[in-house]
Amino acid sequence: MPGNAAYGCGIAYRNFFHSALLKNTDKIDFLEIPTEDYIVRARRIMTDPTGSVLREAMDAFPSVAHGISLSIGSVEPIDEGILTETRKFLDEYDFDEWSDHLTYHRMKDQDLTIFVSIPWDEVAARWVASQYNLAREIIKQPFGLELVAYGFPVAGSELSEAQFANKVAEYTDCWFLLDVCNVFINAENHGGDPYQYILDLPTDRIQHIHMAGGHYMDGEWADSHSQPVPKEVFELLDFALEHTAARAVILERDAPPREFGPILDDVLQAKEIFLKHRPEKPAPNLEELVKLAPEVQTVVEPLSLNSPPAELKNLQNYQRALVDCAFEMAVGKHDGQTAEQIINSFDLTDEWKARWREMNWKSMLKLKDKLAFIMEDDKVSARYYQMAEMHHWASILGRDAVIGR
Ligand SMILES: [Fe+2]
Ligand SMILES: [Fe+2]
């Protein structure tokens, strides 16, 4: 197995282009493996029940891991179970690097599976730092946080997104994954200068970059990873490589392609840009370098849910209300009600009600529509999973056992 730290230009691994990847080991520098495809049983059974296909990919490429379940911004206990499984997976396959997202999507076991913006308040930065430090004890090394594309920023935030990221950097030893497609999408959908945004981030902590192509629908961009990388995103990649410490660029493409050629073209174009700013070969001690924590770190008193300050409790109530609201709207509970009636049906402080009111309600309706679509899609996936599970057991026990003889 090659060394497992990322350098150069790689691709987010999806098993539908497994064989195409193996034919291009000379052109693709590394893979980014989606952790949950292997640690969540339903997903593993459907993709690679024995893990043998992943082994084959990892024998051919250096590989890093990327998760989606952390929900580090949720004001509730961190999911230690998923982190323990992640650590086991990192050990089993000998990964040096792992990242997840600077966002939240789950409250009280209800998971939107859609990233929403953490309010960029000081208390939220301290909460994320507290959660990061707990997670880091289980992961046992610094890990990365990806800056996400979000449907709407939370109105009335005390900080800008970049200031929030700087606070998190100050209070922890995390590194950052900058997704230049997310930078493009957020600037297009919510305004702001994407170049200045990059400069304002903790640029020396940015280690990895994602790039992808989204699609434009109903007046806004969606982070669908379904299209070739647009020119604007390549331009942001160029700028990000010039102004940050990033050493690894990853192409994300989620829709199964008709042909692999255009995907490879995007990787090769990124490589050309990468080589304008970085040497062809990484430092010889790359694996050791990626595990080193930064020297300067401000230690802050961790926040706890046992005796939460009022701002934290209020933030938690807002997050619960938002997630509950999306699920209730997705099943039609608030049909016919005004935004004001819906907001008033939740037990929030006047300040939080005012912040919610200021947000664009259209975005809330889009969140509801997206969630309703995902809930329908999950029903189909559940049926596929049942079939895949039966097939898996049939292959282990033999056909007769499955038909119940
Ligand atoms: Fe991601
Ligand atoms: Fe990404």
Image (spheres, rainbow, N blue to C red):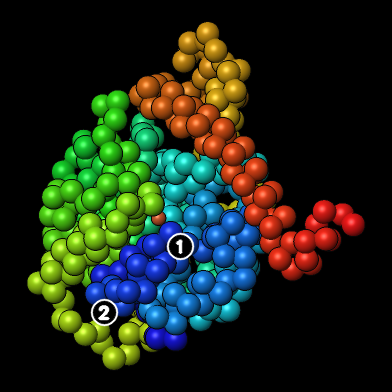
Q: What residue type is labelled 2?
A: Asp
Q: Which residue is drawn at 56% across and 33% down?
A: 376
Q: In this view, does 301 lie to the left or right of 151?
A: right
Q: Is residue 61 visible?
A: yes
Q: 34 or 19: nearer the eye?
A: 19
Q: 343 or 328: nearer the eye?
A: 328
Q: In this view, does 11 lie to the left or right of 125?
A: left
Residue bearing the label numbered 2 = 26
Q: Residue at x 59, y 56 (%)?
A: 46
The residue tagged with tag 1: helix, strand or loop?
Answer: helix
Q: Residue furthest left?
A: 276
Compared with 395, 215 (above or below) is: above
Q: Where is residue 231 in the image (x, y as percent from the top left)?
A: 13, 50
Q: Where is residue 5 in the image (x, y as percent from the top left)?
A: 37, 79
Q: 191 or 249: nearer the eye?
A: 249
Dividing the picture into quadrants, the one containing residue 9 is bottom left
Q: Does the residue labelled 2 lie within 8 Å of ligand 2?
A: no
Compared with 170, 295 (above or below) is: below
On residue 221, the disc is none
Residue bearing the label numbered 1 = 15
Q: What residue type is labelled 1?
A: Asn
Q: Can residue 131 be seen in this view?
A: no
- The disc, 1 or 2, on the residue closer to the chain's N-terminal end is 1
Q: In which quarter of the image is the C terminus?
A: bottom right
The residue tagged with tag 2: helix, strand or loop?
Answer: loop
- How many labels sit on residues? 2
Q: Which residue lies furthest to the top in this view?
A: 336
Q: Where is residue 137 in the image (x, y as percent from the top left)?
A: 57, 71
Q: Where is residue 128 in the image (x, y as percent from the top left)?
A: 48, 54
